[in-house]
Image (cartoon, coloured by chain):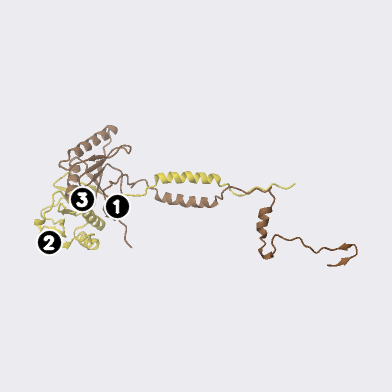
Chain colours: A yellow, B brown
Amino acid sequence: MARKKISQELDLTPFIGLFAMLVVLLLVTASWSKLYSFKTKFSKSVESLSANEPQPDKKKETTLKIQIYGKQIIFVEEGPKPKKSPMALQQPLNAVALGQKVEAWLKRFGAKKQITIESEGKVGYGVLIEMYDVIFGAGMEAIAFSTGNLKAEDL
Amino acid sequence: MSHELGRVESQVLTPGFNLEPQYDLVQTRKHLFRSKGRSIPEALPLTSMIDMFSMVVIFLIMNFSANGDAFYVARDVVLPKAKNADLMESYPLVSILQDRIYLDALPADQPQIELEEKIKPYPKLRRLLKEFLTKELRENPGKKPEMTVNIQADKATPMSRVREVMKLLVEEGWTGIQLTVRKKYDEK
């Protein structure tokens, strides 16, 4: 009597149904466009919107500011030894040159030193974000925004 | 032709299907004239479909994300790009355009609130933020609400406008402000 041959192959038909359901589920839940954000925490002091809980600056200490005007950026150190370093404002920003300036500050003052970003009212939001990106990427942790607008006459 | 008494051997051969043997399609003839008892399977061969599905599932699993979804980007907004930002988390969204402010703080089945706020001190936005906070406190009593919002603005929006809205948010107690951006990748 001949032995009945048993098929050793797996039946893949239900596998196709499973995959079809998986594909539909993952298509619905897939994230095609992701957004990112800079997480900041502001203090309620509205004289200066101080992000990321900066340390209070005393008069004898050096205050660091980055002033953004329509055509230039000025790195300002206010304090016992005031200093101003202007740089042309390029679109897009020269991240390498800006990063070097910020890293120099980082080495001198440390990561927890507050940097205040001031700008003219007409400066675009994109410029602020690029500047924030450079400062944050360099390692500085305390970044503040001023509430007032700079004026070109202040230059 | 040989002739023998009473017997003739025929040398007439039955012709084949083609006069010229080189044109004789043997396999085609077999296919056409095979026995009708054998049935041709009509099912599609799905083996390669499994491979295709495997690739699609792997691709979609890699794209799966529990956060960072772009739940709303205003039509007129071109977000700035940044390298060092983190994935966005879901919080009430304030969209700042040149002449309008949108507030997206409602469930997904309700539309965004468009506030035509051109004049300080933005009373509509203040009122709606207070209403949202009241609703949060009512729905989750005893739980301190996370006073965090997402801000998105076009990269050409003047800083004066963005600064006004940020100041308003901080005054109303929304001290956690997340600046929404798109990821910038290194250009090769």
Question: Horizontal and vertical percent for residue A128?
Answer: 21, 54
Tag 1 residue: B182
Circle nearer the viewer, 1 or 2: 1
Q: From the top left corner, tell me how far across and down residue B168 is, in percent.
A: 18, 42
Relative to residue A9, is residue B128 depicted above or below? above
Q: Residue at x 14, y 58 (%)?
A: A76
- Residue A87 versus residue B115: which sits nearer the camera? B115
Q: What amino acid does circle 3 point to?
A: Thr
- Give the residue at mark 2: A83
Is the C-beta separation of discs 1 and 3 under 8 Å? no
Mark 2 chain: A
* Mark 1 vs mark 3: in front: 3
Name the residue type under label 1. Arg
Asked whether the beta carbons under mark 2 and mark 3 sit within 8 Å of each other, the answer is no
Asked if labels 2 and 3 share a chain, the reply is no
Q: Are marks 1 and 3 on the same chain?
A: yes
Q: Which residue is mark 3?
A: B157
Quarter containing the N terminus of chain B = bottom right
- The chain letter for the residue carrying disc 3 is B
**Neighbour tally class for label 3: few under 14, some 14-19, many 20 plus, Cα within 10 Å:** many
- Write down the chain letter for disc 1: B
